[in-house]
């Protein structure tokens, strides 16, 4: 029985729906579904190396699993538009510059919203894929670069 | 006789960096861009989406005083250092969905700036280097990642 999540832009009302890759990434899906026991409401950030990526730093109230127990599943170095991925970085794992967010643990929940995503050799687990509203979401996400970060809500979609 | 200098200001921040032109290393690029700055340039700067800690500035038509495709590769790199001011040109229709400048000035404001496009590494001419207020400028520029576009002013000293 497929499970779905919704990505909603509080700024514009843009809405996308993604189907979880239950077969391909079962443990990651289970973890992400648990994390979304309560909706994730946070800023959408435009990536600075990957290109057309909308990233969310999962806030503490959604950090409901042990991220170190999630194995790599359905992983790729070449995500395509619509792919939703999760990657965890322990505290201090990546270089910190300008007091940016990377000093603490990073729960990176991100969406590839257009072509030409460049991960630079990093491998990420794809646990869901947008099946509805990608264009709408992409149009909204494209505005972040110009106008700055904006609020989104990611939540479980009831059947 | 010293090198020519430019001022780079992120408008509204009170932060102005001074950069010296690398006349020996990139003579033709310096000549082209100095001529472009006959009138001060005040235009939009965007944070990079593929190039890391880089500010990207499309040179507007009003300041294209030279043929962009006539500037040779000079002092080029794909791994700028913080404070490097770069130039790169792509023919308008060459690259699908390009979100970097097609005729552009870039400023590497911090480490991990990479000159590239979706079709690969993009050697860019380093034609100036920030020699004053580099740290303060870098920090102010870093706010654009979350904050969005800012107006930048570049002018001859």
Image (cartoon, coloured by chain):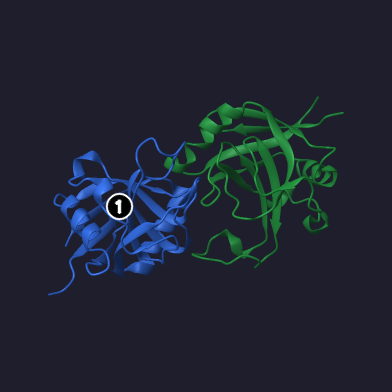
As rendered, which of B56 and B148 lies closer to the eye? B56
Which residue lies under the disc numbered 1?
B12
Q: Quadrant of the C terminus of chain B?
A: bottom left
Tell me residue A22's x, y (percent). 83, 37
Q: Which chain is mark 1 on?
A: B
Quadrant of the image occupied by residue B93: top left
Quadrant of the image occupied by residue A115: top right
Quadrant of the image occupied by residue A8: top right
Q: How many marks?
A: 1
Q: Going by the image, does B118 lie left or right of B157?
A: right
* Chain B shade in the render: blue
Q: Which residue is rendered at x = 26% and y = 64% of the image?
A: B26
**Looking at this rendering, what residue extends furthest in the bottom direction?**
B1
Q: Quadrant of the N terminus of chain B?
A: bottom left
Q: Which residue is rendered at x = 51% and y = 44% of the image?
A: A149
Q: Which residue is rendered at x = 23% and y = 39% of the image?
A: B61
* Chain A shade in the render: green
For the residue carrying disc 1, how many other residues have a C-alpha within 10 Å: few (<14), some (14-19), or many (20+)? few
- Label 1: state its secondary structure: loop
Q: Is there any visible trace of residue A11 in the rendered image?
A: no
As rendered, which of B55 and B27 lies closer to the eye? B27
As rendered, which of B51 and A18 lies closer to the eye? B51
In this view, B153 is above or below B126: above
Q: Going by the image, does B32 lie left or right of A70?
A: left
In this view, A83 is above or below A12: below
**Looking at this rendering, what residue extends furthest in the right direction?**
A1
Q: Which residue is rendered at x = 63% and y = 41% of the image?
A: A111
Tell me residue B5's x, y (percent). 20, 65
Tell me residue B146's x, y (percent). 48, 49
Tell me residue B13's x, y (percent). 32, 56
């Amino acid at each position: 029985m497929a499970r779905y999540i919704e990505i909603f832009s509080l700024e514009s009302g843009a809405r996308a729906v993604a189907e979880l890759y239950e077969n391909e990434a079962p443990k990651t899906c289970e973890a992400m579904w648990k994390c979304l026991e309560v909706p994730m409401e946070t800023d959408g950030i435009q990536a600075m190396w990957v290109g057309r990526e909308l990233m969310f730093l999962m806030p503490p109230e959604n950090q409901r699993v042990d991220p170190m127990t999630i194995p790599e599943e359905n992983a790729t170095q070449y995500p395509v538009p619509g792919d939703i991925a999760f990657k965890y970085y322990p505290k201090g794992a990546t270089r910190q510059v300008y007091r940016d967010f990377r000093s603490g643990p990073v729960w990176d929940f991100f969406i590839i919203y257009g072509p030409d995503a460049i991960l630079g050799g990093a491998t990420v687990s794809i646990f869901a894929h947008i099946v509805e509203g990608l264009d709408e979401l992409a149009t909204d996400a494209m505005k972040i670069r110009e106008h700055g970060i904006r609020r989104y809500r990611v939540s479980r979609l009831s059947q | 006789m010293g090198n020519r200098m430019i001022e780079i200001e992120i408008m509204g921040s009170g932060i102005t960096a001074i950069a010296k032109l690398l006349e020996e290393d990139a003579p033709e690029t310096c000549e082209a861009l100095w001529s472009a700055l006959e009138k001060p340039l005040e235009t939009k700067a965007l944070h990079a989406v593929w190039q890391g800690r880089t500010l990207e500035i499309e040179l507007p038509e009003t300041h294209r005083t030279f043929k962009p495709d006539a500037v040779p590769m000079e002092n080029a790199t794909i791994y700028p250092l913080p404070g490097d001011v770069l130039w790169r040109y792509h023919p308008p229709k060459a690259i699908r969905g390009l979100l970097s400048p097609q005729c552009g000035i870039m400023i590497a404001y911090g480490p991990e700036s990479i000159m590239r496009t979706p079709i690969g590494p993009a050697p860019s001419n380093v034609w100036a280097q920030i020699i004053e207020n580099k740290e303060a400028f870098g920090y102010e520029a870093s706010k654009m990642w979350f904050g969005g576009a800012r107006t930048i002013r570049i002018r001859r000293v």
